[in-house]
Amino acid sequence: MRNIQVPGKRSQSTNTALAGHSEEQHRATSDSSSPTLAATRCGSMDAGTSRRGFAAGEYVKQLSQQSDGDRDLQEHRQRIQALSEETAQSLKRNVYQNYRQFIETAREISYLESEMYQLSHILTEQKGIMEAVTQALLLQADRDDPALGDAAPRGGAAAHSHHPPGRRWRAGRDLLPESPGKYLVYNGDLVEYDADHMAQIQRVHAFLMNDCLLVATALPNRRGAYRYDALYPLDGLAVVNVKDNPPMKDMFKLLMFPESRIFQAENAKIKKEWLEVLEETNRTALPRPAPTPPESTNPFDEDEDEEEEDEPSELPEDLDVCIAQRDFEGAVDLLDKLNEYLADKPVSQPVKELRAKVDERVRQLTDVLVFELSPDRSLRGGPRATRRAVSQLIRLGQSTKACELFLKNRAAAVQTAIRQLRIEGATLLYIHKLCHVFFTSLLETAREFETDFAGNNGCYSAFVVWARSSMRMFVDAFSKQVFDSKESLSTAAECVKVAKEHCKQLSEIGLDLTFIIHALLVKDIKGALQSYKDIIIEATKHRNSEEMWRKMNLMTPEALGKLREEMRSCGVGNFDQYTGDDCWVNLSYTVVAFTKQTMAFLEEALKLYFPELHMVLLESLVEIILVAVQHVDYSLRCEQDPEKKAFIRQNASFLYETVLPVVEKRFEEGVGKPAKQLQDLRNASRLMRVNPESTTSVV
């Protein structure tokens, strides 16, 4: 049978720390209680010496020789007494300071004590089982009776296995205690390795039940016979994949605090099956029933009976035990029991003393629970890891504090997760990872908050404030990568789209933070739109300055077909009426380039659109269009060549009657309402075409 031991190094270091602390306390007590020694030390301090072997008699003799009389000696005596008192106070302060270190050491011991306490109960549960199993296995091995056959799953559920055909598994009839719904899920051969040296230890056979994992070791001289080794409840079991490092491969680790074990499967496929079935079974594991060991084999029965008969005066000591063993639920249960006991008791001196003792333990318990929720603790395990401490604080009437600490813990976890993200070369890839990490954490936190604080409606406002603060932290990381790095408008639009889609997922639990992300991003998006608008205007002005008003010759049918497709994607469906023979286009290069650039800007801007940006987008479009409109109108007034003037009118017709209506229609589709400013601009342009000789400005 596998021996279960507490790690020696930890125990030794802990005992050493306790021993050192006890020696320090004893030394402090001795110093403060001995006037002679205190005076000696004070005198030594006064003389500027702190070495060992100080001779008090020699010091007094030297002091009397240097003194001028009795009064001088009296002053020295008073000064030594003052130093003695100061030293005593200093020693007391040191003891108080070391008391916190003693508490930390006691907490470390409490981890070990709690595990030993639980292991004792587990061993007690299994003592009777092991005796019956051992007898059954020995009898079965002697008879070599194949009637027992393979271990069948209880409950009629189908079980998975990967042992070779013909192999017989020998087991006693009562290998596991009967419980409703228990059945075998999976079983198979494994090889156990030493976690430190990776040396092979033994061959085992593991039986995965729906609520526990049983490990049996192979008997060396009896083929097909196994001996019970360990039983692990699934609620305290974690499985970790071990990365292949040839020749060590196909391994996984089982974590059962405070120990861990490494097993090797036959191949990668079986290892994958073990990992998947362990994770799935652990997720759907049945609650573990309360142990009911036989009365004759449970050495704790008598202790439990005595505990039930404990007087309330012993509750402070019981609370100390629960706190030391980190049995927070048991401690709060004792407090409820005490409050029930004191509910109808008159206020007497014994009751006051008992209440004072218990109040001190309540403060200690609260401090421990607060420490459990502090961000300094490990943030692994997700929001559910905080449920135990939160629930007990709520039971203690500390709902507000529990809410505050829970949200601080989760804020630190979210911030740590964001900081640990690697900034990839591709901005969009990083944003996908950032959104997944942040919004998943936010969703898990919201669900856990709703579970823990379901009956405390006053805490929900604190959660909303926390969510807004967390969203600000997310937007800071988002903007730094997307907007501060001067990404293109198309990349920024795609990143914002990804963030909006993730934000909408929160509506599944009734949490809508879309308006918050809009409010936090509006400044950066406005700046990006205006910056890209300025780029388009400068490019359009540059092309206008070089305008020759000539038809486009695309040279090849392929180039003409590509331009047709680009115009069709921009919404220009009647582009064919502007094409001629032999790959000619009856439009100016400037007008065609302006059309493609303007429509691309509009499409990307609509991806970024939300109501707060309506006027920014509309004004940007008007400014861009005015640059092209004014150039065409000016050229139409100034050109004297009749042929070129006809060509300019054809470009103006394309711009006014095709491009501007497409812009209006697409804007209305994307925003949901028409834009009067764009309609007014088109009407003003129509007036300009009616009187082309006019010098009136459109601006």
Image (cartoon, helix red, strand yellow):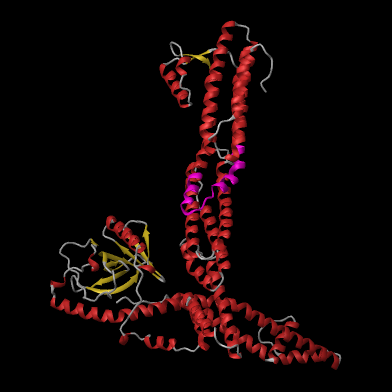
Q: Is residue 374 above or below residue 26?
A: above
Left or right of 420 on screen, residue 245? left
Give 645 or 681, whichever is nearer the viewer.
681
Residue 327 in view: yes
Quadrant of the image containing the C terminus: top right
Residue 545 in view: no
Q: Is residue 631 above or below residue 445?
A: above
The part of the chain drawn in magenta is 500-528
Q: Is residue 82 magenta?
A: no
Give 1 or 348, whichever is nearer the viewer.
348
Determine the residue positioned at 30% across, 84% down. 294
Quadrant of the image containing the N terminus: bottom left
Task: Using the rendered view, name the quadrant where residue 166 is placed.
Answer: bottom left
Point out residue 128 in the picture as x, y percentages from the top left corner.
28, 82
Determine the residue positioned at 60% across, 29% down. 676
Point out residue 20 in the picture as x, y percentages from the top left corner.
55, 81
Determine the residue positioned at 48% across, 69% down. 388
Point out residue 576 in the picture as x, y percentages from the top left corner.
45, 17
Left or right of 242 on screen, residue 43? right
Determine the residue positioned at 75% across, 89% down. 59
Point out residue 76 in the picture as x, y percentages from the top left corner.
80, 88
* Total numbered labels placed on residues in the image: 0
Task: Using the rendered view, name the quadrant where residue 85 is placed.
Answer: bottom right
Give 355 or 435, whichever is nearer the viewer.
355
Q: Please identify the dominant SS of the magenta region.
A: helix
Q: Is residue 511 magenta?
A: yes
